[in-house]
Image (cartoon, grey):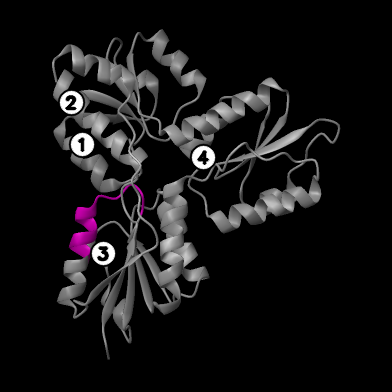
Amino acid sequence: MTKRVLLAAPRGYCAGVDRAVVTVEKALDLYGAPVYVRKQIVHNVHVVSSLEKKGAIFVDETHQVPEGSIVIFSAHGVSPAVHQQAAARNLKTIDATCPLVTKVHQEARRFAADDLQILLIGHEGHEEVEGTAGEAPDHVQLVDGLDGARNVEIDPNRPVAWLSQTTLSVDETLEAVGILKNRFPQLQDPPSDDICYATQNRQVAIKQIAPQADLVLVVGSKNSSNSVRLVEVALEYGAKAGYLIDYASEVKDEWFEGVETIGVSSGASVPELLVKDLLEELARRGYGDVETVTAMEEHLLFAIPPELRKDLRAAGK
């Protein structure tokens, strides 16, 4: 039996996550601990606990931040109401929202200004969806999955457009849009693709590996939408089994019975260190032959938020 690992590229950190994590680290360095962060800065258990050890305090809501303190908004974005709450508490805000999420917020505002109904394809309760919907609460209806697309109702006499969460399955979103357009032929598209480059690229890479894989292991947290989607996509495209793990120590002996080829990837909020740990664990189990399967190269970088850049410059850092 020839044991091998097919390692997906690209994988792991995207530009928006890198920017958000660096924002917290630089804020701690500049202002000192504690620095408050509303919600998990990114959806990864390891990243959050590492930043907590450095002095970041994660809170669920703005009212939990002491008046006059610094608060960082997570990569998933917040609604205008959250900005207003922060202003009312005299908080110094640093907005680490991913620029690709901000783009969707702007599209929501533009559609609402033209009085369009907005069908927002996404997962109920996800922070990104709450932030985008909060830009135009009177215009947005959530469409959660294919059932949502089949059952949503609109006013047939008013124009309608769709937007999506940035971290969905590309295939499932296209299928949902197909259902919606079938039901509402007047449905308008967003000006550009909402699903972000990193989500798309990681799905393309795992699609190339999945048909050859007896087992796919995706490093990522359970609340990470894009990581969960990677496992789903791997199974849809032919992987015989697939699991989502936070740490290498979570793998189970029974997963490896009769397994020759293992596909490995990681979600967009996962540091490479955790993938390295998994590869070492697989090597110990006899899967030391690693081949990288590169779907495309990524070179995108985002500058840190301007409010933090200004303070760093003033401090000569």
Q: Which residues are magenta?
A: 267-278
Instruction: Work out whether 81 lies above or below 119.
Output: above
| Disc 1 residue crowd, few under 14, some 14–19, many 20+, Cα 10 Å | some
Q: Nearer the viewer, mark 2 or mark 3?
A: 2
Q: Is residue 228 left or right of residue 271?
A: right
In this rendered view, identify the residue nearer to me: 75 or 241: 75
Q: Are marks 1 and 2 in contact (CB under 8 Å)?
A: yes
Q: Position of residue 282 (x, y in %)?
A: 21, 73
Q: Are marks 1 and 4 in contact (CB under 8 Å)?
A: no
Disc 1 from disc 4: Cα separation = 24 Å
Q: Position of residue 308 (x, y in %)?
A: 27, 20
Three-letter code, disc 4: Gly
| Disc 3 residue crowd, few under 14, some 14–19, many 20+, Cα 10 Å | few
Instruction: Work out whether 251 lies above or below 289.
Output: above
Disc 3 secondary structure class: helix
Q: Find out whether residue 273 is within the magenta segment.
A: yes
| Marks 2 and 4, the one that precedes in the sequence | 2
Residue on which disc 4 sits: 125
Residue on which disc 1 sits: 51
Disc 4 from disc 3: Cα separation = 27 Å
User: Can residue 225 be seen here?
Assistant: no
Q: Are marks 2 and 4 in contact (CB under 8 Å)?
A: no
Residue on which disc 2 sits: 28
Q: Are marks 4 and 3 in contact (CB under 8 Å)?
A: no
User: Can residue 271 be seen here?
Assistant: yes
| Most distant residue in the bottom direction | 1
Three-letter code, disc 3: Glu
